Image: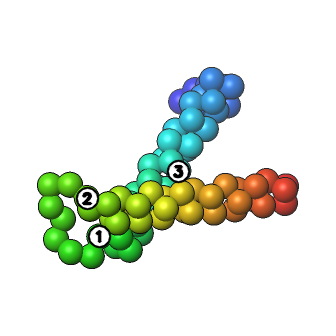
Amino acid sequence: MDTSGLNSPELQRFLNQEKEKAMVNEMVAKLTNVCWDKCITGTPGSKFSSSESACLSNCAQRYLDMSVIIMKRFQSMH
């Protein structure tokens, strides 16, 4: 089996892109679960109430802010 292509820059770039996509998908899934459990307390209707919408927006923003802080901290460690 020819493994010379396994170290190619194109393959590495592709793998990095796929890894980033997986991380984003995982973050969105976690964000959805956390914020849904926190903000949606009753049976959801056809649309969110204003308090649910505000809660979801604030929850998502705080989660993303913390993710950025954590990523910056990890980057500064390298």
Decide: marks 1, 2 in contact (CB < 8 A)?
yes
Vertically, is 70 above or below 37? Answer: above
Quarter where residue 61 is shown: bottom right
Quadrant of the snapshot with the C terminus = bottom right
Q: Does residue 37 appear in the picture of this structure? A: yes
- How many angstroms separate mark 3 from mark 1 (CA)? 25 Å
Query: Where is residue 44 drawn, in percent x and y?
Result: 18, 65
Quarter where residue 19 is shown: top right
Which residue is at a point 76% across and 55% down the rendered structure image?
Answer: 72
Task: Name the disc covering residue 40, or none.
Answer: 1
Query: Where is residue 45 drawn, in percent x and y?
Result: 15, 61
- Please tell me which of labels 2 and 3 falls first in the chain: 3
Horizontally, is 51 left or right of 70 in the view? left
- How many angstroms separate mark 2 from mark 3 (CA)? 28 Å
Task: Name the disc covering residue 48, or none.
Answer: 2
Q: Secondary structure at mark 3?
A: helix
Query: Where is residue 43 drawn, in percent x and y?
Result: 16, 71
Residue that carries the numbered disc 3 in the rendered image: 23
Which of 62/48 is in front?
48
Which of 77/51 is in front?
51
Query: Where is residue 20 drawn, in percent x and y?
Result: 56, 43
Which of 49/45 is in front?
49
Q: Amino acid at mark 2?
A: Phe
Decide: few, some or many residues near mark 2? Use Cα within 10 Å; few <14, some 14-19, many ≥20: few
Front: mark 2 or 3:
2
Task: Name the disc covering residue 27, or none.
Answer: none
Q: Secondary structure at mark 1?
A: loop
- Please tell me which of labels 1 and 2 falls first in the chain: 1
Q: Amino acid at mark 3?
A: Met
Q: Secondary structure at mark 2?
A: loop
